[in-house]
């Protein structure tokens, strides 16, 4: 299973890390693992929950409590086979996104414009 850093989650969600950390505290479904250095690693499932949470909060204008309840209802509802298939496809798309998307350049990786580093 693929693992993603908080920087990956920020890039995908287009929200700041402190927002993601706050959502983690408020939504117990989010359970990122920690690597040997103590950094949080998000699973594809975590990213899917974060994407759904962001959609419910920003697009549908749910409160955080309402969005959390909606996600719980969706996970416990009917058509679990269909939901599992969709979840698998989303996971594959996330993997493709992070494989194909170029990493953001930092000042260390950018040249000065004249070909020298």
Image (tube, rainbow, N blue to C red):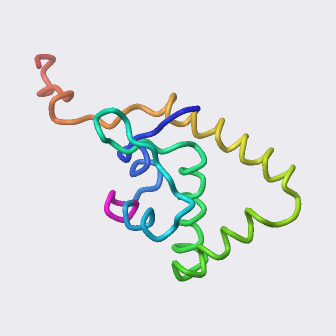
Q: Nearer the viewer, residue 110 or 28?
A: 28
Span shown in magenta = 16-20
Give the vertical position of 6 relative to 65 (above or below): above
18 is within the stretch colored magenta:
yes
Left or right: residue 107 versus residue 29 is: left
Give the vertical position of 21 relative to 1 (above or below): below
Residue name at image x 33 percent, y 57 percent? 17
Q: Quadrant of residue 108?
A: top left
Residue name at image x 37 percent, y 35 percent? 35
Give the vertical position of 30 relative to 110 (above or below): below
For the view shown, which residue lies furthest in the top direction? 116
Left or right: residue 115 versus residue 67 is: left
Q: Nearer the viewer, residue 55 or 68?
A: 68
Residue 2 place in picture, x, y as percent: 54, 33
Q: In which quarter of the image is residue 75?
A: bottom right
Label the magenta part by its dominant secondary structure.
Answer: helix
Residue name at image x 32 percent, y 42 percent? 39
Q: Quadrant of residue 109?
A: top left
82 is within the stretch colored magenta:
no
**Image quadrant containing the C terminus:** top left
């Amino acid at each position: 299973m693929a693992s993603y850093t908080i920087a990956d989650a920020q890039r995908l969600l287009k929200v700041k890390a402190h927002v993601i950390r706050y959502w983690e505290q408020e939504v117990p479904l989010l359970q990122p693992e920690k690597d040997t250095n103590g950094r949080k690693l998000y699973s594809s499932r975590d990213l899917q929950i974060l994407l759904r949470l962001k959609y419910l909060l920003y697009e549908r204008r749910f409160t955080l409590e309402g969005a959390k309840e909606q996600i719980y209802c969706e996970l416990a509802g009917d058509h679990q086979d269909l939901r599992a298939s969709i979840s698998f496809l989303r996971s594959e798309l996330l993997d493709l996104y992070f494989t194909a998307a170029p990493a953001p350049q930092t000042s260390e990786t950018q040249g000065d414009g004249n070909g020298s580093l």
